[in-house]
């Protein structure tokens, strides 16, 4: 049983795949728990240096499974508990020193926006579409949307999505800064793989710490961020990889000046 999420780890790369295509990869109760488990498994695996988040089927993620909420006799407390499980997974990924890239095709709706923005770098198919739809069914933002969406595109644009029945296409999502790149659907998988391999082939740990500093820094004071930066760069400087790269850079610079 995969409970709607597949996990494959090989050669330092973890691939997390939403796998409920018949439900547009909407998260039901078992999938929510699986997401939390996968997040903890991936971030505690010292062999993992980069993460790809992708999905099977025509859509990336339709958010929470509203049909399941409506047909299983779920209470408000059940919905809260499920949201908290997903939130735990989101927080675990966001705060981990691991660079993450998402391959986004088709529709991204509701909480799917928050799950998408869990990653650090989003590549979208030119056929991708983005919409909120929370208020349409009388619900409020969850899965990090109230924080991650305005952090990505600004408060005013976030409110345009949340307060209007507005869908934006891939080109507008790129213009707004919701995604980092737009590629043809046929190139989506290969482009995301290329990005992840770039991280793994380079100073992997430094990329990971860069994502952590930026993500965690949003919720702390400036002084706390400065202290973390100082400690992190000092620790990085002590690693053999960084020492070798710094020495090579210094040597190349000296040669260029001579």
Image (spheres, grey):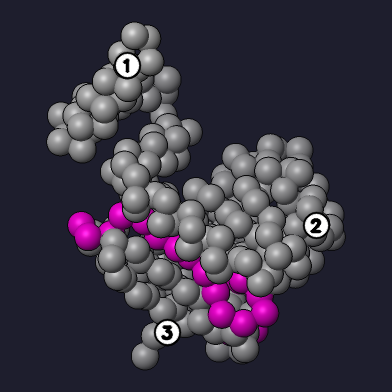
Q: Is residue 254 magenta?
A: no
Compared across the picture, whether 155 is left or right of 98 comes to right
Question: Residue 126, image x and y in percent?
Answer: 74, 63
Residue at image mark 3: 3
Task: List the single residue furthest toward the front.
Answer: 258
User: Label 3 crowding class (10 Å Cα cut-off): few <14, some 14-19, many 20+?
Assistant: some
Q: Which of marks 1 and 2 is nearer the N terminus?
A: 2
Element assignment for label 2: strand
- Name the one closer to the observer, 252 or 151: 252
Q: Is residue 21 above or below residue 124?
A: below
The Cα atoms of the two marked residues, 1 and 2, are separated by 50 Å
- In percent of the image, x 41 and y 57: which residue is there? 197
Residue 168 is labelled as: 2
Range drawn in magenta: 46-68
Mark 2 touches mark 3? (CB < 8 Å): no
Residue 194 is labelled as: none
Question: Residue 83, image x and y in percent?
Answer: 49, 65
- In percent of the image, x 62 and y 48: which residue is there? 180
Question: Residue 53, image x and y in percent?
Answer: 48, 65
- Of circles 2 and 3, the one toward us is 2
- Name the one closer to the observer, 32 or 208: 208
């Amino acid at each position: 049983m995969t409970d709607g999420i597949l996990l494959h780890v090989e050669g330092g790369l973890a691939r997390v795949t939403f796998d409920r295509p018949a439900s547009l990869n909407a998260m039901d109760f078992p999938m929510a728990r699986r997401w939390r488990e996968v997040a903890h498994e991936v971030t505690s695996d010292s062999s993992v240096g980069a993460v790809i988040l992708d999905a099977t089927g025509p859509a990336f993620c339709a958010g929470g499974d509203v049909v399941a909420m409506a047909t299983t006799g779920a209470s408000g407390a059940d919905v809260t508990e499920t949201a908290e499980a997903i939130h735990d997974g989101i927080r675990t990924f966001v705060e981990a020193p691991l660079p993450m890239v998402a391959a986004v095709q088709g529709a991204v709706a509701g909480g799917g926006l928050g799950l998408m923005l869990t990653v650090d770098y989003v590549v979208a198919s030119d056929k991708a579409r983005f919409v909120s739809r929370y208020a349409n069914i009388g619900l409020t933002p969850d899965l990090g949307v109230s924080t991650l969406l305005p952090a990505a595109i600004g408060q005013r644009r976030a409110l345009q999505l949340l307060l209007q029945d507005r869908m934006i296409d891939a080109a507008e999502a790129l213009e707004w800064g919701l995604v980092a790149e737009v590629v043809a659907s046929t190139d989506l998988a290969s482009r995301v793989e290329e990005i992840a391999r770039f991280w793994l082939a380079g100073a992997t740990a430094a990329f990971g710490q860069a994502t952590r500093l930026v993500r965690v820094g949003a919720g702390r004071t400036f002084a706390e961020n400065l202290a973390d930066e100082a400690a992190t760069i000092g620790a990085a400087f002590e690693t053999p990889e960084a020492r070798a790269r710094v020495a090579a850079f210094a040597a190349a610079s000296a040669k260029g000046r001579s």
